[in-house]
């Protein structure tokens, strides 16, 4: 019996060992059907990014042509509804204000190489940057100031600064490309506006490896969505646009893999129009309230703060050392920079709420603005409770104070970054920097600079909380609730919907009913006593 028991135990141990080995082998197997390290075209030491792209195109022959048709490449979008020509090459914002005269710096987030000015060749296939989206090593970096180019050997930049940019091993990176990841998308989208979490509020580096509490979809131990899970790409076209968002989706669920659906980024594309199975009453809200309104109770809650305001009018101060002054808060975040002005940061921020129908109109260069119309809406989200197209959405409203031309009455393009004497971050001279910026876009400038208050609006769509952390009824159906300032809709329990005279009528009816019951009961008692 002992021998048989030992034999069984030994067999079981061997089975477990083999199972563990098989499991380990499976976990090491790549999900890709190609090992790029074995490709002949990638067995070379690349000296530049375009050299890598030429190698990629030997197999992926149509990739660059597809990329050329995207907003990520063109930095341009013509809105079919408003007919405005938008995109980074055309708009002004209230963060770093404009990419147009700062392309050498801003192009570190362009999916191409060499965009240093308006003469960039948008037809060039070899200038497409494949690695910026498909790097899987985490080592690929595009330094600011180099027009989107990369360096392959240690380089001092800016020249004479003593700062060294480490060269990249493009051969190693090219041999380990793969699908996009949260980190590759986030390298630009998490850091928009000049730093981690600055711009969006619901996008920052905490989403690289989030837990369930931060985002139920991207939870690294759960659903582990990448950006492309929702922003399902076809021919390099990435759905989901801040220039023309989908505010209301009346369709039901759409299966992944079926082509022709541009709205796969909406909640309804997966969850349908009646997502609440256990509490069907909640489905009565889905025709007027965006899912995000209840399911994203706050943003910037992953430990990374977001900027809430930026006042350029206070920029220009220098410290005792003659360098631009920098003031930090207790957490190490800049609250003042001599080259940028004053900032206000926030964490775990409650959104503001608006009616939104998907139409966004921008204040573009050349549009006349008035000081009496402050704050100027850099991008105005349109919507109404009566248009049949709007829903109540959560948004981040970013408040700024930025340079404008008080004579021509337009927002201005400011040349900020560069080693030349016209860059504001070099000279702290507004007139000189604005003059250079406006000249770069061939726009008139009076020579005068003033400052005007502005607002920009950003939809909140990420950092979806677990259902137990979603808003409850009393968050809105109460005096001073989340939707206190939303007009055109009746919300029981809200102070502005409280009608004193109606309450009086209700109480009067209740009192009469009670009196009637009492009189009826008294009459029955009297009648009974008489019969007795």
Image (spheres, rainbow, N blue to C red):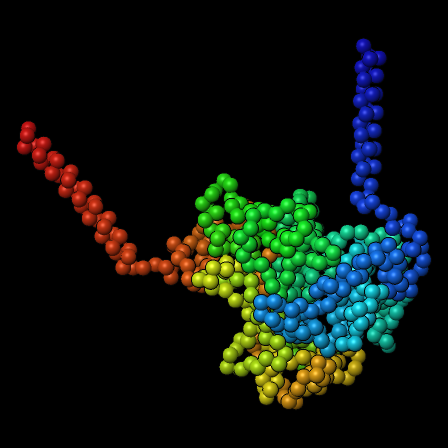
Residue 209 can be seen, yes or no: yes
* Quadrant in which residue 428 is drawn: bottom right
From the top left corner, tell me how far across and down residue 442 is, in percent.
70, 83
Residue 397 can be seen, yes or no: no
117 sits left or right of 358 in the view: right
Residue drawn at x 34%, y 59% is 498
In front here: 241 or 520?
A: 241
From the top left corner, tell me how far across and down residue 163 is, in percent.
84, 71
In front here: 78 or 297?
A: 78
In front here: 196 or 222?
A: 222
From the top left corner, tell me how far across and down residue 358 is, in percent.
56, 62
* Quadrant in which residue 484 is drawn: bottom left
447 sits left or right of 127 in the view: left
Relative to 503, say whether 377 is above or below.
below
Quarter occupied by the N terminus: top right
Count of all numbered marks drawn on residues in the image:
0
Relative to 403, say whether 329 is above or below.
above
Relative to 490, say whether 326 is above or below.
below
Residue drawn at x 82%, y 53% is 177
261 sits left or right of 162 in the view: left
281 sits left or right of 94 in the view: left
Residue drawn at x 69%, y 80% is 414
From the top left corner, tell me how far across and down residue 179 is, in percent.
77, 51
* Quadrant in which residue 361 is drawn: bottom right
Residue drawn at x 86%, y 77% is 160
Quarter occupied by the C terminus: top left
């Amino acid at each position: 019996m002992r021998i048989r028991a030992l034999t069984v135990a030994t067999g079981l141990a061997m089975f477990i060992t083999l199972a563990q080995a098989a499991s380990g082998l499976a976990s090491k197997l790549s999900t890709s059907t190609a090992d790029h390290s074995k490709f002949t075209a990638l067995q070379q030491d690349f000296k530049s990014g375009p050299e890598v792209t030429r190698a990629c195109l030997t197999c992926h022959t149509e990739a660059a042509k597809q990329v050329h048709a995207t907003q990520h490449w063109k930095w341009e979008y013509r809105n079919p509804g408003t007919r405005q020509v938008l995109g980074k090459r055309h708009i002004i914002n209230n963060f770093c204000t404009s990419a147009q005269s700062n392309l050498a710096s801003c192009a570190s987030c362009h999916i191409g190489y060499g965009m240093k000015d308006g003469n960039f060749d948008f037809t060039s296939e070899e200038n497409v940057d494949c690695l910026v989206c498909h790097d899987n090593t985490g080592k690929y970096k595009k330094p600011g100031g180099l027009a989107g180019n990369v360096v392959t050997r240690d380089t001092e930049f800016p020249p004479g600064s003593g700062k060294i940019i480490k060269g990249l091993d493009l051969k190693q990176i090219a041999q380990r490309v793969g699908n996009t990841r949260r980190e590759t998308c986030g390298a630009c989208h998490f850091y928009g506006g000049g730093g981690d979490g600055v711009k969006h509020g619901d996008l920052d580096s905490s989403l690289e490896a989030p837990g369930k509490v931060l985002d139920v979809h991207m939870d690294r131990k759960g659903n582990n969505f990448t950006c492309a899970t929702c922003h399902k790409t076809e021919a390099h076209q990435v759905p989901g646009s801040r220039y023309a968002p989908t505010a209301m989706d009346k369709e039901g669920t759409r299966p992944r893999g079926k082509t022709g659906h541009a709205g796969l980024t909406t909640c309804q594309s997966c969850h349908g129009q009646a997502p609440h199975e256990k509490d069907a009453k909640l489905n009565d809200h889905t025709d007027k309230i965006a899912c995000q309104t209840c399911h994203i109770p706050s943003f910037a809650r992953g430990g990374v703060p977001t900027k809430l305001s930026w006042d350029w009018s206070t920029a220009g101060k220098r410290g005792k050392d003659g360098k631009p002054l920098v003031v930090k808060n207790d957490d190490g975040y800049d609250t003042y920079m001599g080259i940028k002005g004053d900032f206000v940061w926030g964490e775990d921020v409650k959104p503001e709420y608006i009616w939104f129908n998907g139409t966004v109109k921008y204040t573009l260069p050349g549009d006349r603005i008035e000081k009496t119309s402050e704050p100027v809406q850099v991008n105005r989200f349109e919507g109404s409770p009566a248009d049949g197209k709007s829903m109540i959405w959560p948004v981040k409203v970013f408040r700024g104070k930025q340079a404008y031309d008080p004579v021509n009455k337009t927002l201005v393009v400011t040349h900020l970054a560069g080693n030349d004497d016209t860059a504001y971050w070099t000279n702290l001279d507004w007139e000189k920097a604005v003059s250079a910026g406006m000249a770069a876009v061939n726009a008139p400038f009076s020579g005068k600079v003033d400052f005007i208050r502005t607002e920009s609006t950003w939809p909140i769509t990420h950092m979806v909380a677990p259902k137990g952390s979603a808003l409850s009824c009393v968050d809105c159906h109460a005096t001073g609730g989340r939707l206190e300032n939303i007009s055109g809709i009746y919300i029981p329990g809200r102070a502005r919907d409280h009608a004193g005279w109606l309450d009086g009528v209700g109480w009067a009816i209740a009192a009469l009913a009670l009196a009637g019951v009492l009189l009826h009961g008294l009459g029955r008692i009297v009648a009974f006593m008489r019969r007795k």
